[in-house]
Image (cartoon, grey):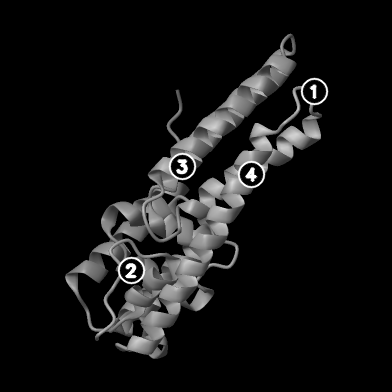
Amino acid sequence: MSTAFSERPGRHERHYRRRLDNSLFGARRLYADDAALFEIQRLDHEELLTFLAELRETVQRAVDLEPNAGSEVILDLKERLDRLYETSAGLAEDHSANQAAIAQLVEVIMRNVERAAAGDPQAIAELEQERAARGAHFALLRWPLVADLLHPQSTVGADDLAPTLLTAEVAELDAALTLFDPDQLSLLYADAQRVASSAPATDAVGARLQQIETHLQRLHTPPPLN
């Protein structure tokens, strides 16, 4: 191939590379194609430009926010920032600086909301729970596979889910498996077994299949009584 892979690919290129010469994808397996790679890199670049424009607009909205802005305006701004953080995790290039700035802005907004809720213990408790959940969510988004799966227009369709997980590295698979409830994971495990049996057996695929099974067993094991 004359078109080089990106050092930090976006979600389209990542999925292209998962499917490239990968027998787990069956009929959806891809073969080297310069034109196809160039096109998906173009798509990733367009998504990057769209994100940067929206980020600039949202940051400006935060800067211009009136001190007496209503709760609806503030919460809408916070939701936009949360969504931008999630989007950034799936983009080409390194966005750690943008993510730090977004997280800082969200924290400023949360502190303002907490001050407004002073004297309401239930509201304060709910805000703390929300902060903890956001922190856990942002931590999961360190893994590009998680961002790829959570994207509203995910490149990983239903037919690609099992082979994608069987292709993942150990740590990113552990992170991705937390996105599924027991019923979803049971169906996924059955699909992964079928996909694995239809491709040449390898130690890596067998290990990933065992990893999914172990996670599923853990979900079905009741917690110990105190």
Q: Nearer the viewer, mark 1 or mark 3?
A: 1
Location of mark 3 (residue) = 99
Secondary structure at numbered mark 3: helix
Q: Which quadrant holds residue 8? A: bottom left
Residue at 70 percent across and 13 percent down: it is 121
Secondary structure type for disc 1: loop
Looking at the image, which is closer to me, 122 or 59? 59
Label 4's element?
helix
User: In which quadrant is the C terminus drawn?
Assistant: top left
* Viewer-proximal residue among 15 and 192: 15
Residue holding disc 2 = 166
Q: CA distance from mark 3 to mark 4?
A: 13 Å
Q: What whole-number distance in Å separates the C-alpha atoms at marks 2 and 1? A: 51 Å
**Is residue 169 visible in this depiction of the protein?**
yes
Task: Give the mark nearer the N terminus: 2 vs 1.
Answer: 1
The front one of 166 and 131 is 131
Closer to the eye: label 3 or 2: 3
* Residue designated by label 1: 68
Residue 129, percent from left and from top: 59, 27
* Residue 31 image point, x, y percent: 31, 89
Residue 151: quarter of image: bottom right
